């Protein structure tokens, strides 16, 4: 009953509100809000050129052209007020734009929205028809094999792969040439990270972006195709459902401890060993290294997936991350050059594109702290002069891994022992497996991987084709690796005992109660 | 229905259920609270149970009525299926709890929030000795130039601090997710609102690496900003932090000179 | 009876005058012509080759290796793809005739045909995909609203432009080398220099015009030309290699 009522409310057509109910939009108050909270990025004149703008990619929106990516209106049309408010309220995932709901009041956000509209004369032009498109509802069965097959078929036939790549990681043949309307380099979206889609990651959001396009970017609108019946609306939904299926069902949750189960038989040393499919994977977000010169304000790698197993003698760690390029890649040299010229760094940063390799570093403390509950650990950013960290460093060219001790970001001393490394670059994804014996051969310098304790671990990644090298990288804070021991049979004894005792007590209570009942 | 609402046993069951729902689902919704840990939930529920038992055993008649359904469950032949069910479910639950207790999983060590230690009385800023005790923001002595300093502070903030401390100065910048402990929330009344400007200057200038070793384990990612910013830029950004959040810095007159500027908070 | 006749004639005269007053004869079409040549001096720049190996269908449409069309120097040493139009000088009362017919922009061989074109405000631009592979057509106007349409197959999309704008850049992002330039004008007095470098703007009403010649790489040049009646005047422009 309630469901039916709710459904009725949800599908009821929006009734135009009487004018006295429409909230007043005060551009004077809006200006005060804008100057205080928005101008730092978007600029006093709304041109997207605030103090922070040069450090950002994507750049803050330039309001003077009234061109907006995330709309419910047709390609090239102005956004509705609701579209603008939605972006302000929820922010744009994957960019520096935060959601302002809860940070500014309803009135402040609405006033700021109305002030933003004053930066372009288009909003005052009454000949502009700002009408939201009518969107259908998704057809059912969107996660089924058949539906996804149809979606994939259109993914290929209408050329999505040209930019987004065969597997959707933004590595298509046209991707290295892409620029937005302002001439800034722009990445074709990585369709495996729907939680970073600017307009939201639901099937409905994806369908809307296909219908409206993302104005100001190379992403076109597919509405003409549907209007001219080259594609049915259902087929476009199938495409959206296929795109959605490339990302995890839920945005990855960060869990602090990587559990490495103990497996029978040898650990999988190859990245594509089928054994990995049975191992839980953990997501760790990486962010720009903005602590030491030279800083990285717009890092390329947004996070790594980590899996670990051990066989009581050897640890295998599989790290996978999305990287469009198998660096060095000459096809991306021009893009790298444009990136370096677009994203401001520190003065000392070189502006010349070079053929850097991709890199990954996995870091452990040099010594595992005994006291203080294992809380003591070196500085997360590669330790310090008196507090080194033990690192594995893998590079794509030469394709190898080394181990060493880092004492701060500038000093790395290689150790003779190296972890075994195998890597695959497959359609925009690196999968690297690093293996090493649990017991170190060099006990003075290498960290032992003891089962049953939390071993701090951190990750760093570089995309060479984005000009990342040295201190320009993506970093994580400390997380933990735990090598699980198989559950000993003794663990099951006490629960079973507890159950038997409880059952016995229960029977006694029942018996006594019944006896008393009959004797009374 | 009335039969149940007025019966002490079912009242007790109702109270326990309501208490559980409140503790587990309602409390986390209150502003400023978090999810209640399991052990605490257990404590709360035990307290409620004791209270209920005291109430029902308060009068003999109520106690007898309270016991009725229990006795019935134990004795009545028609309730035999319920009886068997309870005899199976309760031991299984006990077994599961016992398993949860003995089975060991490795958890992340607790992360204690670091408390700001007392600042040094003097620091060396780019080779220049600066005495922190009694130090006020020198820029405040030029009221006419304050708007210009503020504007510069805003620029410095947006070009350097924004990725971590965020647009709203609440420590939720777009890079905040990569750091632990989280970047300081300047909107919170426990950070800059509790500090003198000289303390803030010290934290900015020396960052995480400048925290004394005797403090609790620090993992602060706060850079040593003396490597990036001039003295005036740091004082300017401090002006901006207070202006933008609306807090006023603690002053030396009010707090005395002893532990001036000391407060709690984290980077 | 005669009186009545006079009144009738007077009324008719008045009616005619009124009609003439309310609907002034519009100088929509005059008879004058401005024509000329786009001269080119200096070394002909070498245009970069376009690598179409990702699009075999397009590549097959060329004998040799296609090159970029930013600068097209004709065999006779003149410059092609220069847009010429009356920038100012039309009588204030001038009203363009309602646009008739569509202007077609064809995507063929992963290039735009024509590369430079003009259109009237409100006139339909038919954007045709003759390649049958994915093109997106993006208009990056500033005064006109932009658009970005996906055309993954042989199809035609129509769009119009609401205000005059010289130029609206058109581009395809799948094929970064594809560029075209569209001028939106309130009058039909424009031309594009062709394979012999010549142009001709016909049907101008009498007046003094500022004629602008626009080239995507070499910028703009202007000339002032006065025409009367049905005369033809010459305005030559000269672009120098950079």
Image (spheres, helix red, strand yellow):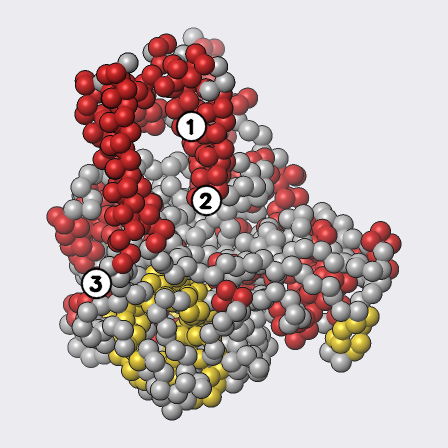
Q: Residues within 10 Å of mark 1 (few under 14, many from 20)?
A: some
Left or right: B148, with A120 as reference point: right
**What residue did someone put label 3 on?**
A277
Q: Is residue A335 visible?
A: yes
In front: mark 2 or mark 3?
2
Please tell me which of labels 2 and 1 falls first in the chain.
1
Alpha-carbon span between mark 1 and mark 3:
44 Å
Residue visible at 43% across and 89% down in the picture: A414
**B22 w.r.t. A322: above or below:** above
Front residue of A359/A227: it is A359
**What residue did someone put label 2 on?**
B39
Q: Position of residue B4 (x, y in %)?
A: 35, 14
Residue visible at 23% across and 35% down in the picture: B88
Query: Is there one chain holding both mark 2 and mark 1?
Result: yes
**Residue A277 image-quadrant placement:** bottom left
**B47 w.r.t. A277: above or below:** above
């Amino acid at each position: 009953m309630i469901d039916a009522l709710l459904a009725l409310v949800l599908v009821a057509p929006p009734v135009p509100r009487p004018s006295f109910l429409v909230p007043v939009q005060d551009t004077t108050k809006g200006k005060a809000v804008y100057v205080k909270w928005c101008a730092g990025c978007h600029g006093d004149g709304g041109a997207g050129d605030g103090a922070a703008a040069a450090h950002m990619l994507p750049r803050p929106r330039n309001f003077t052209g009234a061109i907006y990516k995330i709309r419910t209106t047709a390609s090239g049309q102005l956004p509705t007020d609701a579209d603008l408010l939605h972006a302000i309220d929820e922010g744009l995932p994957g960019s520096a734009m935060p959601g302002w709901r809860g940070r500014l009041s309803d009135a402040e956000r609405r006033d700021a929205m109305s002030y933003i509209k004053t930066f372009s004369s288009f909003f005052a032009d009454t000949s502009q028809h700002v009408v939201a498109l009518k969107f259908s509802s998704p057809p059912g069965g969107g996660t089924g094999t058949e539906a996804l097959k149809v979606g994939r078929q259109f993914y290929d036939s209408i050329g999505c792969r040209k930019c987004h790549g065969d597997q959707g990681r933004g590595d298509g043949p046209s991707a290295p040439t892409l620029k937005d309307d302002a001439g800034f380099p722009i990445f074709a979206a990585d369709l495996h990270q729907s939680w970073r889609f600017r307009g939201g990651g639901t099937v409905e959001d994806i369908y809307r972006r296909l219908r409206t396009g993302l104005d100001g970017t190379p992403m076109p609108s597919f509405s003409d195709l549907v209007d001219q019946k080259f594609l049915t609306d259902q087929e476009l939904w199938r495409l959206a459902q296929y795109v959605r299926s490339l990302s995890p069902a839920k945005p990855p949750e960060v869990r602090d401890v990587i559990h490495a189960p103990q497996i029978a038989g040898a650990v999988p040393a190859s990245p594509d060993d089928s054994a990995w499919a049975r191992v839980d994977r953990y997501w760790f977000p990486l962010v720009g290294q903005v602590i030491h010169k030279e800083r990285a304000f717009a890092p390329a790698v947004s996070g790594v997936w980590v899996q670990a197993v051990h066989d009581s003698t050897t640890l295998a760690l599989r790290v996978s991350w999305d990287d469009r390029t198998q660096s060095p890649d000459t096809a991306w040299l021009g893009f790298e050059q444009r990136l370096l010229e677009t994203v401001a760094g520190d003065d000392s940063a070189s502006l010349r594109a070079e053929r850097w390799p991709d890199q990954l570093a996995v870091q452990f403390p040099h010594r595992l702290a005994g006291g203080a509950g294992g809380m003591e650990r070196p500085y997360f950013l590669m330790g310090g002069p008196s507090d080194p960290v033990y690192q594995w460093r893998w590079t794509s060219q030469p394709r190898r891994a080394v181990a060493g001790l880092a004492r701060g970001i500038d000093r790395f001393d290689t150790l003779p022992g190296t972890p075994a490394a195998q890597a695959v670059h497959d359609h925009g994804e690196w999968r690297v497996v690093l293996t090493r014996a649990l017991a170190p051969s060099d006990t003075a310098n290498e960290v032992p991987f003891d089962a049953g304790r939390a071993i701090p671990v951190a990750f760093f990644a570089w995309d060479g084709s984005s000009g990342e090298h040295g201190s320009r990288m993506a970093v994580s804070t400390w997380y933990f690796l735990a090598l699980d021991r198989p559950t000993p049979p003794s663990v099951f004894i006490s629960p079973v005992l507890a159950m038997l005792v409880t059952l016995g007590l229960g029977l006694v209570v029942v018996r006594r109660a019944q006896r008393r009942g009959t004797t009374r | 229905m009335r039969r149940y609402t007025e019966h002490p046993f079912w009242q007790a069951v109702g109270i326990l259920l309501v208490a559980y729902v409140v503790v587990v689902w309602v409390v986390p919704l209150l502003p400023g609270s978090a999810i209640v840990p399991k052990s605490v939930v257990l404590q709360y529920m035990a307290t409620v149970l004791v209270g209920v038992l005291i109430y029902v055993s308060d009068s003999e008649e109520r106690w007898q009525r309270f016991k009725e359904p229990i006795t019935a469950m134990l004795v009545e032949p028609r309730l035999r299926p319920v009886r068997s069910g309870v005899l199976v479910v309760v031991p299984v639950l006990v077994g599961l709890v016992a398993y949860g207790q003995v089975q060991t999983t490795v958890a992340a060590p607790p992360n204690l929030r670091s408390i700001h230690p007392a600042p040094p009385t003097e620091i060396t800023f780019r080779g220049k000795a600066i005495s922190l005790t009694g130090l006020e923001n020198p820029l405040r002595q030029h009221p006419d130039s304050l708007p210009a300093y503020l504007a510069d502070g805003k620029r410095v903030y947006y070009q350097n601090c924004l990725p971590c401390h965020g647009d709203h100065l609440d420590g939720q910048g777009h890079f905040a997710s990569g750091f632990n402990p989280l970047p300081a929330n300047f909107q919170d009344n426990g950070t800059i609102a509790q500090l003198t400007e000289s303390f803030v200057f010290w934290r900015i200038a020396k960052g995480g690496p400048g925290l004394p070793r005797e403090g609790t384990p620090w993992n602060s990612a706060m850079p040593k900003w003396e490597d990036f910013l001039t003295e005036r830029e740091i004082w300017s950004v401090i002006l901006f932090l207070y202006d933008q959040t609306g807090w006023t810095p603690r002053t030396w007159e009010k707090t005395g000179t002893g532990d001036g500027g000391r407060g709690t908070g984290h980077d | 009876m005669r009186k009545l006749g006079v009144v009738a004639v007077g009324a008719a005269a008045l009616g005619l005058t009124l009609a003439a007053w309310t609907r002034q004869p519009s100088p929509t079409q005059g008879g004058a012509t401005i024509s000329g040549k786009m001269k080119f001096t200096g070394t002909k720049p070498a245009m970069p080759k376009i690598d179409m190996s990702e699009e075999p269908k397009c590549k097959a449409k060329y004998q040799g290796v296609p090159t970029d069309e930013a600068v097209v120097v004709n065999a006779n040493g003149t410059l092609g793809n220069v847009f010429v139009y009356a920038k100012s000088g039309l009588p204030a009362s001038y009203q363009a005739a309602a646009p008739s017919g569509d202007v077609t922009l064809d995507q063929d061989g992963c290039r735009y045909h024509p590369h430079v074109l003009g259109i009237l405000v409100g006139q339909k631009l038919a954007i045709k995909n003759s390649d049958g592979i994915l093109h997106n057509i993006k208009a990056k106007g500033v005064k006109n609203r932009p658009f970005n349409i996906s055309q993954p197959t042989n199809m035609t999309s129509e769009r119009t432009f609401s205000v005059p704008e010289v130029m609206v850049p058109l581009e395809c992002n799948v094929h970064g080398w594809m560029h075209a330039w569209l001028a939106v004008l309130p009058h039909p007095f424009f031309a594009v220099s062709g394979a012999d470098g010549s142009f001709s703007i016909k049907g101008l009403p009498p007046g003094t015009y500022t004629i602008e010649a626009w080239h995507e790489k070499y910028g703009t040049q202007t000339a002032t030309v006065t025409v009367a009646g049905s005369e033809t005047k010459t305005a030559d422009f000269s672009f120098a290699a950079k």
